[in-house]
Image (tube, grey):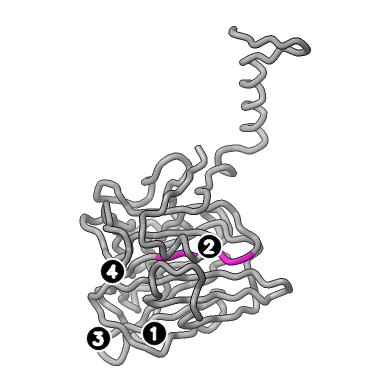
Amino acid sequence: MREWQGAASRVSVQAVVLSYAILLTCFPPTVLAQASLPFSETFDYATGNLVGQGSGLSVWTRTGAQTAAPIQISAGSLSYAGLPAPVGGKVMLANGSNYEDAGLDLESQTTGTVYASFIVNVINPGTTTGDAFFHFSSAGTGATDYHALVYAKRGSTASKVQLGIRNAATDTTQYAPGEYDVGVPILLVVGYTFGPGANDDVASLWINPAVGTQNPPAPTVQAGTNSELSSVGRLCLRQGQSSTSLNLQLDEIRVSRFWSDVTLPVALTSWVLE
């Protein structure tokens, strides 16, 4: 075995291998499987199921146990003025009985604000009941502590949609006052801010914010909570209840601790632990 010998000590490849084995024993892949921030997802994969797609340790996995109608990647991208030209495909989210949800574990965050931006194109706003299609949670496929849930519902007509935010699953959804056109791509930024005390975290939603700014403007709508996350460790895409009939396309996800990263007019580089 090749070795390096110094004046005072000898370091061998064998020692390095042993150290790596100890690391894997103490921190198995299921713990290390987290996408580091900033993170970017353009869905540049072959069309088909989303679950199982990804690279390194940033791989999409099923959230929960529902298996019907797996989330699909479709050809073509969503674009938004001021953002980089899109690449890859997009995901299709529909609502139905026991439809699959999917997510991706992130580098755990416990302070400050975690931002996620993405483009949505609502095909069918569904009913006026509304339903969630995106949220944060703690890490793991079995996590149920959903927070910063982004909602959509039918507006005054079937050609209009309203968008809102709910901090915890048991809270009331706070909808933005405006309506948006169905079939027109919308840029959304969702933020989860950790407060200094108990039950004081805040979820925020920005709808079509200015692109390329250093700091966030006032959010379009916010929601407080009576419960909070100990850490943001997973982003999730949700296919909701069959009774709400929501159907939309989603693309170009960016996640970071910094506002400027998720609204940059240039492509965002992400680092993945491998």
Q: Earlier in the sequence, mark 1 or mark 2?
A: 1
Q: Earlier in the sequence, mark 2 or mark 3?
A: 3
Q: Are marks 1 and 2 in contact (CB under 8 Å)?
A: no
Q: Residues within 10 Å of mark 4 (few under 14, many from 20)?
A: few
Q: Nearer the viewer, residue 163 or 195?
A: 195
Q: Earlier in the sequence, mark 3 or mark 4?
A: 4
Residue carrying label 4: 81
Q: Label 1, label 4: how many angstroms apart (C-alpha)? A: 31 Å
Q: Amino acid at mark 1?
A: Thr
Question: Which label lies toward us, 1 or 2?
Answer: 2
Q: Is residue 113 magenta?
A: yes
Residue span colored magenta: 112-117
Disc ID at residue 183:
none
Q: Earlier in the sequence, mark 1 or mark 3?
A: 1
Q: Is residue 223 left or right of residue 131?
A: right
Q: How would you classify the magenta stretch by its main secondary structure?
A: strand
Residue carrying label 3: 158
Q: Amino acid at mark 4?
A: Ala
Q: Residues within 10 Å of mark 3 (few under 14, many from 20)?
A: some
Q: Label 1, label 2: how many angstroms apart (C-alpha)? A: 33 Å
Vertical side of 139 occupied by 123: above or below: below
Quarter placement of the N terminus = top right
Residue carrying label 1: 129
Displayed quadrant of residue 250? bottom left
Q: Label 2, label 3: how many angstroms apart (C-alpha)? A: 36 Å
Q: Amino acid at mark 2?
A: Phe
Residue carrying label 2: 258
